[in-house]
Image (tube, rainbow, N blue to C red):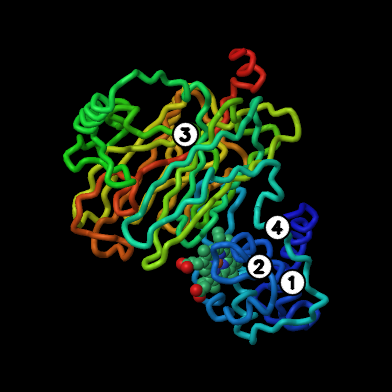
Amino acid sequence: MKRGTSLFIILAVAIAGISLSQRTIDASGAPVTFTKDVAPIFFSKCAECHRPGEGAPFSVLTYKDVRPWARSIRAQVAGKEMPPWHADPHYGEWANDRRLSQSEIDLIVNWVKDGAREGNPSDMPVAPTFTNGWSIGKPDIVIPMPETFTLEAEGPDEYQYFEVDPGFKEDVYVQMAEARPGNRKVVHHIIAFVRPPSENKAPRPKMSKEELQKLREKMERESPRYREGFLMRTKKDAPVVDDGCAAVNGGKINRNDEGDVGTLLCGYAPGMNQAVWKPGTVKRVPAGSKIVFQMHYSKVAGSVQQDRSSIGLTLAKSQPEKLVRTHGISNGYFLIPPGADNHKVTACWTAKEPIHIINFMPHMHLRGKAVEYKAFYPDGTTEILMNIPEYDFSWQTVYYYKEPKAIPKGTRIMVTGYFDNSAKNRYNPDPTQTVRYGEPTYDEMMIGWMDYTVDTESIKTITAKRD
Ligand code: HEC
């Protein structure tokens, strides 16, 4: 959205909020209408998802598109199902907080009750503009998957990996990044990782086919993980660590088991917002890096589908100062018993330097019930940083701090997830299963992602060290 437009919307919403709360007529006695009162709210709070080409079922950009949905809008808005937002307002202040104010909710509800009138077309605010569907505007660089992928009509979900060499001769500093699915019917999620050149040069021992096969089998036998088709799963009899914080190495039995594929650059999942960092704070893609697409596909029964997804990058326009680092505080060894309705799993991470946290993105699957990030400060005090009392797998929201959160060196951050593997959980694919960590959505995950900057680090010192 252009800055002028958003400022206009903010002003319009503020004015509407003051003059119209609880009423179906405005201050001058005129009835509440779409063009004058409702559209500004929809443009600022709904259009991000409710516009042509996005995941939501209808567009809010015109009255004609909105009108047939009026009853549903009233129910969803009054019930606070829409806009989707799951962070407990008692903890943290979030820049992308999508919630409507009570006066906005009342206004929308009353507008529908009153017949969902259009009003004077000349009152209509300027619609937000989007560039070919990109939410970050026209990206400087678009990197598509190297090929179109064809997905068969039947069978379980698939994880597919595609590697692309974007040909970066120098380090690239990324200000905004967005992943866009090519085919929304089948793309469940995209995660784009950066694989720096240092990781590309792993020496490959010369081996015969037989030797290689033997080595693979040995690794599989000894690993707590195994591959099932295109999916990585944890063996049912792998060691169990529910309380990752009490365990050595944060519950990671062997770091390499976590399937590290490099630094996370950006992702797509329903409800996930694009990655936008403040000027001066950037993600770095080192020269010579490869971009790895991790694609999670869900099939459309009876129909062969194709996909070629892309990522778009907008580069820093000024000299960047701070590097964004991404870390997933995760536990890969929990075990959720069949029927358990509030199974607790923890994971911990300690800040070795003073840092500023930019955002959080908790990730669990269908049995995810609630999740919390809590800080244990070196002075003995504690603070809940973020609480999601009702986790919903449908919404992979990234929660951006209004102001980056200062975390002193030595602070331990604990992520606690609760899982509902009972029949009460209507999303539960099978309450009779013992559930472990794995890629398919019928397995579980427990990852507390976060972006942060290190206070003592500047891009100048990093570059100097390396050169
Ligand atoms: C982050 C993205 C996002 C935002 C923001 C958002 N929506 Fe939605 N909305 C969706 C998606 C996706 C669905 C479809 C959900 C589903 O199929 O389960 C949906 C569904 C709905 C539905 C239900 C349609 C039906 O099937 O009856 C209504 C009504 C709705 N949204 C209204 C709104 C309104 C009004 C706003 C703003 C005040 C809003 N939404 C903001 C993504 C969003």
- How many discs mark residues in the rendered view? 4
Quarter of the C terminus within the rendering: top right
Quarter of the N terminus within the rendering: bottom right
Q: Are discs 1 and 4 less than 8 Å apart at CB? A: no
On screen, residue 185 above or below 254: below
Q: Which of the two discs, 2 and 1, sits closer to the camera?
A: 2
Nearest to N terminus: mark 3 or mark 2: 2
Q: Judging from the image, what secondary structure is the residue with disc 3 in?
A: strand
Q: Where is residue 266 in the image (x, y as percent from the top left)?
A: 54, 42
Mark 2 residue type = Phe
Q: Where is residue 361 in the image (x, y as percent from the top left)?
A: 48, 45
Mark 3 residue type = His
Q: How crowded is mark 4: few (under 14 residues within 10 Å), some or many (20 or more)?
A: some
Label drawn at residue 193:
none
Label drawn at residue 327:
3
Name the residue that disc number 4 marks: 130
On screen, residue 467 above or below 245: above
Q: In which quarter of the image is residue 27?
A: bottom right
Name the residue that disc number 1 marks: 19
Q: Where is residue 430 in the image (x, y as percent from the top left)?
A: 24, 60
Nearest to N terminus: mark 2 or mark 1: 1
Mark 4 residue type = Phe
Name the residue that disc number 2 marks: 42
Mark 1 residue type = Ser
Compare residues 108 and 304 and report the one nearer the observer.
304
Compare residues 325 and 12 and report the one nearer the observer.
325
Q: Quadrant of residue 43?
A: bottom right
Tell me the distance, in whole angstroms, between the alpha carbons under discs 4 and 2: 15 Å
Classify residue 158 as left or right of residue 169.
Answer: left
